[in-house]
Image (cartoon, rainbow, N blue to C red):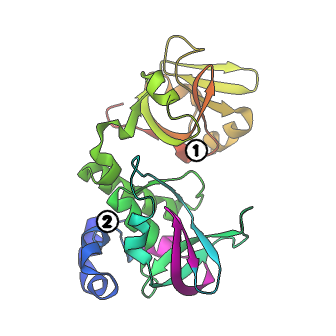
């Protein structure tokens, strides 16, 4: 897939028509042409009537839609709906998805497009640094689109990435514990890979009970092997991991998908 900025430049004329001028900077990083990778089956269209939270909105027909594939990042005391509102408030949108089954709160998960569905709202939020790629997407083409948009924002230090603490240091277990219950990104060097019962631990601290660790259940091993990855190969390598922080003595992130772990440059 071409770098996001190169594709956007080619489609700049189209973006000028479908986006307000204030959003054109971010649209340049949202890869509208390549967003077809997230164009799943149609789930209908509608006009946005209200923004409910950082990734949920209501259509005029009453449906509540939850943006699939991302987790919001909002600074403390910030307006939690402003980023999404600036992009879609009062606008016509098209919904796409692999499954339109509502969640337990009645919200329809979807990939949301502006225009003729060429501009992916999730990619816009990621490119602004107002969202993180979640662990829920399995389609490789769609994952690539989302991760490229997030990487663009991270490299440019936009939004949440302007804060050096946006990515937690795996050696600072206290900082990670403070994120318990939140979706968090952690980077560090795996000091050891140990198996205990049905769980493999990627340990980042020498004190296994208090240091940060990534946990991988035995049922996940075939998925890693299918991707050509042996868990032991993570030892002494720097990785980036994303997921929900749990407190089990020390901070933990459970890996439920191979894509939650990224090898960092310099290994």
Disc 1: which residue:
258
Label 1 – label 2 distance at C-alpha: 24 Å
Which quadrant holds the N terminus?
bottom left
Q: Sort mark 1 into few (<14), some (14-19) or many (20+) by Cα contacts within 10 Å.
A: some
User: Looking at the image, which residue is at 45% across and 35% down?
Assistant: 186
Mark 2 sits on what residue? 4
Image coords of residue 60 (percent x, y): 58, 86
Stretch of the chain drawn in magenta: 35-58
Q: Which residue lies at the image location 31% right of the left edge and 72% below the top edge? A: 27
Residue 164 vertical position relative to residue 83 in the rendered view, above or below: above
The local secondary structure at tag 2 comes to helix
Horizontal and vertical percent for residue 65?
60, 72
- Residue 50 magenta-drawn? yes
Q: Earlier in the sequence, mark 1 or mark 2?
A: 2
Q: Tell me: 232 left or right of 154.
A: right
Query: Does residue 7 appear anywhere in the picture?
Result: yes
| Relative vertical location of residue 259 with respect to residue 152 in this rendering, above or below | above
Name, please, the residue furthest toward the front: 77
For residue 174, which numbered disc appears in the image?
none
């Amino acid at each position: 897939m071409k770098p996001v900025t190169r594709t956007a430049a080619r489609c700049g004329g189209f973006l000028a028509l479908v986006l307000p001028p204030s959003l054109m900077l971010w649209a340049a990083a949202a890869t509208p042409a390549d967003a077809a990778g997230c164009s799943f089956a149609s789930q209908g269209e509608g006009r946005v009537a209200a923004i409910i939270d950082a990734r949920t909105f209501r259509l005029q027909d009453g449906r509540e839609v939850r943006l699939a594939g991302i987790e919001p990042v909002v600074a403390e005391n910030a307006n939690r709906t402003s980023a999404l509102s600036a992009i879609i408030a009062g606008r016509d949108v098209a919904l796409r998805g692999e499954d339109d089954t509502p969640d337990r709160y009645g919200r329809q998960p979807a990939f949301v497009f502006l225009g003729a569905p060429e501009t992916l709202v999730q990619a816009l939020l990621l490119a602004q640094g107002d969202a993180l790629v979640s662990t829920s997407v399995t389609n490789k083409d769609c994952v690539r689109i989302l991760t490229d948009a997030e990487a663009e924002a991270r490299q440019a230090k936009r939004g949440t990435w302007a804060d050096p603490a946006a990515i937690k240091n795996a050696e600072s277990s206290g900082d990670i514990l403070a994120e318990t219950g939140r979706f968090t990104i952690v980077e560090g060097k795996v000091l050891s890979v140990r198996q205990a019962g049905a769980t493999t631990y990627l340990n980042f601290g020498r004190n296994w009970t208090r240091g940060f660790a990534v946990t991988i259940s035995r049922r996940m091993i075939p998925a890693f092997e299918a991707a050509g990855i042996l868990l032991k190969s993570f030892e002494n390598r720097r990785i980036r991991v994303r997921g929900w922080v749990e407190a089990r003595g020390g901070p933990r992130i459970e890996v439920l998908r191979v894509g939650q772990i990224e090898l960092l440059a310099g290994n």
